[in-house]
Image (cartoon, rainbow, N blue to C red):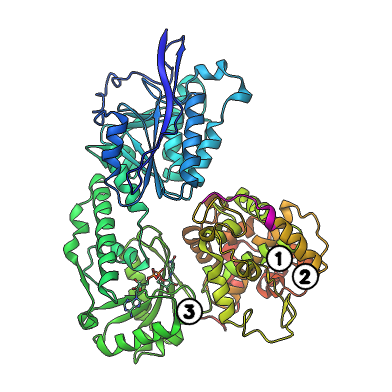
Amino acid sequence: MLSWTEHAQYTQNSKTGAEHFVGLHRSLAAHGRSPALCRSRQGTPDRPAPPRTQSRPLAAGMAQQYARGAAAVAVIRLNNPPLNTLSSAVVRALEQGVKKADVDPAVKAVVICGTNGTFSAGADIRGFSSVQAGDRPSLTSVINLIERSEKPVVAAIEGMALGGGLEVALGCHYRIAHVQAWVGLPEVTLGLLPGAGGTQRLPRLIGVPAALDLITTGKHVLAAEALKLGIIDEIVEENTIDAAIHLANKVSGLGTMGQGIVTSLVKAKMSVVALEQDQKQLEVGVRAVTSLLEHEASKMQWIGQRPDACDPALLQFTLDFGVLQDADLVIEAVFEDMALKKEIFHKLSAICKPGSFLCTNTSALDIDEIASATSRPHQVIGTHFFSPAHVMKLLEIIRGRHTSPITIATAMGLAKTIGKIGVVVGNCFGFVGNRMMTPYAEQAVFLLEEGCKPEEVDQALEGFGFNMGPFRMSDLAGLDVGWRSRKGQGLTGPELAPGTPARLRGRRRYSPLPDLLCENGRYGQKTGMGWYQYEKPGARIANPDPWLHNFLIGYRDSHHIKARFIDEEEILERCLYTLINEGFQILDDGIASAPEDIDVIYIHGYGWPKHRGGPMFYASTIGLPRILAKLQKYSEAHPDIPRVQPSAFLKKLVLVGNPPLKEWMSHAGHQSSKL
Ligand SMILES: NC(=O)c1ccc[n+]([C@@H]2O[C@H](COP(=O)([O-])OP(=O)(O)OC[C@H]3O[C@@H](n4cnc5c(N)ncnc54)[C@H](O)[C@@H]3O)[C@@H](O)[C@H]2O)c1
C-alpha cells in the first residue's frame, strides 16, 4: 500500500505579493509498486542523489520567493511524491495551471518545476491500465499547450526529468537544470517509444543523430552533457527554481534590437559603445544588456567557454554622439522612420572618422536613400538583425547601389565574428524576407473574403509546420502597425482619393478587412480583440470570435461575395505558392543570388519549418511544373491579384525541363542583378 498526496500547484508571483492556490489537492491511496520508469528517489546506484532545493512550506516560501521579481512569474509545481510521476490528476492539474497562467494578465512568465528535488520521473505506467482511456487527459495536448503559450515557460529541473517528465520540459521554452540533474527518455527499456512528442522535439533541439542515440538506448545524461548537447539552456549549482524565476523575469524583459545587437557584439569580445537618446532610455538599456550578458556568461561557462568572453568592461554606454568619432563601424537601430534615419546618418557621416562603416538595422527602408544623407554612400550598408537579436542567427546584409565590396566583406566578417549567418541581398522594399511575406499575408486575408475563418487559415499553416498562422501572428504583432503603414502609403485613411472602390487600388485587388478591424478598435491581443477574441486586453489565448464571423458574413453580403468552402489544400497553395512565386521574382530581379540564400533566410529568420527545407527547396520537392500550374489556375481565377501571376523565371525553369535546384541560377539572366 502506498499513499500519497497528488497534485500540481499553481501559484502566482504578483507585484503586490498576492498569492493564489488553484491546484488540485487530493489525498489518494493506491496499491502497487513504484513506477517502472523510475529508479529511486535517492538517485541511481552510480549517481548521487541531487541536493534538493531547500524544501519550504509552500505559503511562506512562495511569499518570500515572489517578492523578488519585478514581473509576475507563475510557478507550477508537479507534486506526486515520491517521484512526481505524471498521473492523470497531475496532468490535469498541470493543464489547469498552464491555462490559468496564460489568461492571467498579471502573469508575464511561467516556471514549471517538481517538488522535493525531483522534476518528474515520467508517466505513471499504472495509469495506463487503471484509468479509462477516455477519462485520461492527454499529456501530448498539455505539452502542446505549454509550447504554444506566448508567455515564456521555463522548466526548472532538479533530480531527474525522465520520459514524460523530459517531454514536459522539452515543451517549455527554456530549461534550467541543477548541476546534478539528469535527463533521458528511457521508454525503450520497457519496449516503448516516447509518446508525448519527445521523438519530435528532441531531434529538433539537438539533431537527429544525438536524439536517436538517446531514444534508442534509453540512456540518461547528466546536466553538463545535456547542456553540451543542447537539451538544456543553463546549469546552476544552487537553487534551480530561484534561478528559473530569475530567468523567467529576464525573459519577459528582452529588449529592443539595439540591446540584442550590443549583447551579440560584446559576447564576441568586441569593444562597443552603446548610444541612446536620453538618460531614461539609457538606463533601461544598461539594465537589459547587463542582464542579458550575465545570462550569456553563465551559459558559456557551462559549455566550457571562458566567461570573460562576456566581459561588461568591453561596453561603454553614452549619450554623447562625439564618442563615436573613433568607431570602426556603427550600427544604427533607431525607430523605423526614414527622416530620423537620414538625420542620424547625416550626423554620423560628419562625426565618424573617414574609414568607418555605417550600418542601418532597418526592416524594409531604402538603403540608398539612407546612404544619400552621408558623404560616404560606398561605406553604408543594411544589417537587418532579427528579434531577439542576440539569439536569432540570421543577418540579412543589404547592399546599396554604392556599397563597396570592402563594406560588404566587412559586414559579412562581422556576421561571422558574432556567430550569425550573414546573407547578402539586394535593396528593395522588404529585402528578401519581408518582401516574400507580403503576398503570403495578402492571400490569407483574401481567403477570409472568400469564405474562410481566421482559425481555418491558421490551422492549415500551423499544420504545415509554422509555429503561428498569419492571423495569430498579426494579432500578436498588432494590426495597427500595418494600418499606419497603409495610411502612410495612401491606401486607406484620409489620403485615399474620394470615389476609390473599396476593394480595388488601381487595378489591383485590395482587401479593406484589416483596416475595418482597426477602425473598430480591434488591434489584436493588446486590445483583447483582433482576428480572434481574448479574455482581456493583453491576454494571449486566441479564441474564435463569433463577432468576427458575423462581421465577415455581413462584409461578404455588402460586397456581394458568395462564400464558398475552401479546403486546406487551397489555403496552403495560395499562401505558400505565392510566397514561393515572390522568391522566383526575387531571384529574377537579382535581389537574392541563389535559392539556397532564400531558404537560409526563411529557416533562420521566419520560422519556416526546418523539415520542409526552406520555401525554394520545398518548391523543388513539389516540382516546379505543379507550382506553375497551380499559380496559373489561381491567377486565372484572380486576374486582379498581380502577385499570383507566375514569375517569368519560374516559367522559364519549367520550360527548360524543371532542372534541379542547384542548376536554377544557370538559367537566370544576370543583367538585372543587384548583387
Ligand atoms: N523589433 C523588431 O522585431 C525588429 C526586427 C528587425 C528589425 N527591426 C528594425 O530595427 C530598428 C529598431 O527597432 P526596435 O524594435 O529596436 O525599436 P525600439 O523602438 O525598440 O528602439 C529604438 C531605440 O532607438 C532610440 N533612439 C531613437 N532616436 C534616437 C536618437 N536620435 N539617438 C539615439 N537613439 C535613438 C530609442 O530611444 C529606442 O531605444 C527599426 O528600424 C526596426 O524596423 C526591428
Of mark 1 and mark 3, the one earlier in the sequence is 3
Cα separation between marks 1 and 3: 26 Å
Of mark 2 and mark 3, the one earlier in the sequence is 3
Bin the neighbour count of mark 3 within 10 Å (Cα to Cα): few under 14, some 14-19, many 20 and up. many
Cα separation between marks 2 and 1: 10 Å
340, 300: nearer the viewer: 340
Q: Is mark 3 within 8 Å of ligand 1?
A: yes
Q: Which residue is mark 2?
A: 638
Residue 573 appears in the figure: yes
The quarter of the rendered structure image containing the N terminus is: top left
219 shown above or below 639: above
Q: Is mark 1 within 8 Å of ligand 1?
A: no
Q: Residue 493's spot in the image, x, y percent?
A: 62, 80
- Residue at 63 percent across and 68 percent down: it is 514
Residue 234 appears in the figure: no
**Callout 1: helix, strand or loop?**
helix
- Label 2 amino acid? His
Instruction: Check whether the beta carbons of the residues at disc 1 and disc 3 lie within 8 A of each other.
Output: no
Q: Is mark 2 within 8 Å of ligand 1?
A: no
Q: Which residue is mark 3?
A: 365
Q: Which residues are magenta?
A: 540-548
- Label 1 amino acid? Phe
Q: Residue 135's spot in the image, x, y percent?
A: 60, 24
Q: Residue 276's spot in the image, x, y percent?
A: 28, 74
Cα separation between marks 2 and 3: 30 Å
- Residue at 37 percent across and 75 percent down: it is 334
Instruction: Check whether the beta carbons of the residues at disc 2 and disc 1 lie within 8 A of each other.
Output: yes
Bin the neighbour count of mark 2 within 10 Å (Cα to Cα): few under 14, some 14-19, many 20 and up. few
**Callout 2: helix, strand or loop?**
loop
- Label 3 amino acid? Leu
